[in-house]
Image: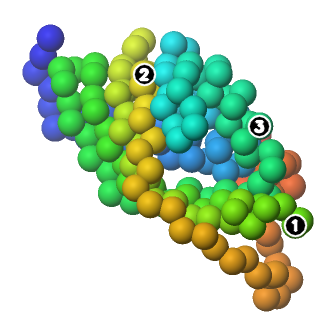
Amino acid sequence: MWTAVTVSDRLQDVQAIRDVVACYCRGIDRLDFDLVRRAYHSDGVDHHTGFDGTVDEYISWVSRSLDYLAGTMHFIGNHHVDFVGDDIAISETYVMATHWGKPGTDERANFTTGARYVDLMKRRDGRWAIAERWAVREWTRPDVFVAPEQPGPRGTRNADDPLIVLLKRFGL
């Protein structure tokens, strides 16, 4: 059912949906699976390359899949939201995700992929989250990684990551 929605309300909805996608990417890159889980409704479904199932099954699968990697970095590009009523939306987000393996792993673990997250988003109890996701892979290319050129801050997937350190400093 449609109700009168102001431009301000709709912009807030679009931002809330974008935040869901951004939090999902942060969760995957930092191995924060509670954050990944929060991107989905509890009965959410995910369709990825090599996986189809519930959000709980997805968390189990993706955590094992990412364990052999040294890191990932998801970059969000174009994002469009089509609303289907007040509490249902279809979100399409372009993503480039780089994956790199731990030393000694198969070189095929080093790749960048271009994909689209096609998400059925629903607002329940005032919260937008993924009800169903299709991670549509468009292309993949192999990558060659080199050692860091200079000492300096490096990302980690644990409590030593600069983001986590800063968030904890302020009690977040």
Q: Can you give x and y, in whole percent of width and height, for residue 97 in the image?
A: 55, 58
Q: Residue at image x 62%, y 28%?
A: 58
Residue 131 circle label: 2
Element class at badge 1: loop
Here the colouring is rainbow
Q: Earlier in the sequence, mark 3 or mark 1?
A: 3
**From the viewer's perspective, is residue 76 above or below residue 104?**
above
Q: Nearer the viewer, residue 132 or 37?
A: 132
Q: Can you give x and y, in whole percent of width and height, for residue 133 in the image?
A: 43, 32
Residue 124 quadrant: top left
Element class at badge 2: strand
Whole-number angstrom distance, CA of label 3 to CA of label 1 = 18 Å
Q: Can you give x and y, in whole percent of width and height, for residue 11 in the image?
A: 26, 40
Q: What is the crowding at mark 3: few (fewer than 14 residues within 10 Å), some, or many (at least 20)?
A: few
**From the viewer's perspective, is residue 70 above or below residue 152?**
above
Whole-number angstrom distance, CA of label 2 to CA of label 3 = 23 Å
Q: Nearer the viewer, residue 82 or 111?
A: 111
